[in-house]
């Protein structure tokens, strides 16, 4: 889960609330063709939920994000559908643990900020720190 969250944060340019509220099926794959060479390439579209300033939209992101989310979905334990606080609809969320959305404080500790300059701890440090501790 942490890998997928870090990937979305690094490559998606999303607000913390948008990351927390991503739907389970938020990734769409598409094909594109390079105009100059004609070579095909894969496009990963991330469906961003409604936020404080805009309606839901699709954002092109690096395919690594789609791969990380796909890997998380394979091992993600079943979770109940939760009511989205912005839309009021009951839907499956991508980043849930024990039937609750991942907390803002948890995301704040993973994605620490220093005087407005966002920085993330080394991905390997995050993974190692979470690997040997049981989930809270």
Image (cartoon, grey):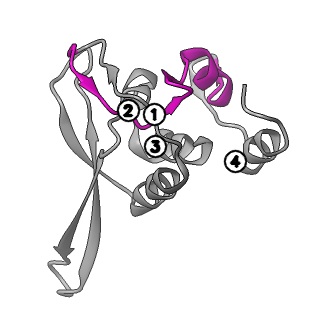
Instruction: Classify 10 Å Cα crowding around label 1: few (below 14), some (14-19), many (20 and above).
Output: some
Q: Is residue 36 magenta?
A: no
What label does residue 79 carry, if any?
1
| Residue at left offset 40%, top offset 57% | 66
Give the mark, 2 or 4, whose residue is nearer the N terminus: 2
What is the secondary structure assignment of the residue under circle 2?
A: loop
Label 3 and label 2: CA atoms lie apart by 14 Å
Q: Quadrant of residue 49?
A: top left
Cβ–Cβ below 8 Å for labels 4 and 1? no
Label 1 and label 2: CA atoms lie apart by 8 Å
- Residue receiving disc 4: 123
What label does residue 5 carry, if any?
none
Give the mark, 1 or 2, whose residue is nearer the N terminus: 1
Q: Observer-nearest residue: 98 or 29?
A: 98
Q: Observer-nearest residue: 111 or 25?
A: 25
Q: Observer-nearest residue: 125 or 120?
A: 125
Location of residue 120 in the rendering, given as x and y in whole percent from the top left corner: 65, 36
Location of residue 22 in the rendering, given as x and y in whole percent from the top left corner: 35, 34
- In the drawing, does residue 136 fall left or right of residue 84? right
């Amino acid at each position: 889960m942490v890998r997928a969250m870090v990937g979305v944060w690094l490559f998606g340019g999303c607000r913390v609330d948008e990351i927390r509220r991503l739907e389970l099926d938020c990734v769409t794959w598409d094909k594109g063709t390079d105009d100059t060479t004609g070579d095909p390439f894969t496009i990963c579209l991330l469906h961003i939920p409604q936020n404080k300033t805009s309606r839901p939209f699709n954002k092109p992101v690096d395919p690594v994000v789609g791969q990380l989310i796909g890997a998380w979905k394979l091992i993600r334990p079943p979770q109940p559908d939760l009511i989205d606080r912005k839309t009021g609809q009951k839907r499956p969320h991508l980043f849930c643990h024990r039937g609750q959305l991942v907390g803002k404080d948890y995301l704040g500790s993973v994605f620490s900020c220093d005087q407005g300059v966002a920085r993330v701890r080394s991905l390997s440090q995050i993974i190692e720190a979470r690997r040997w501790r049981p989930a809270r």
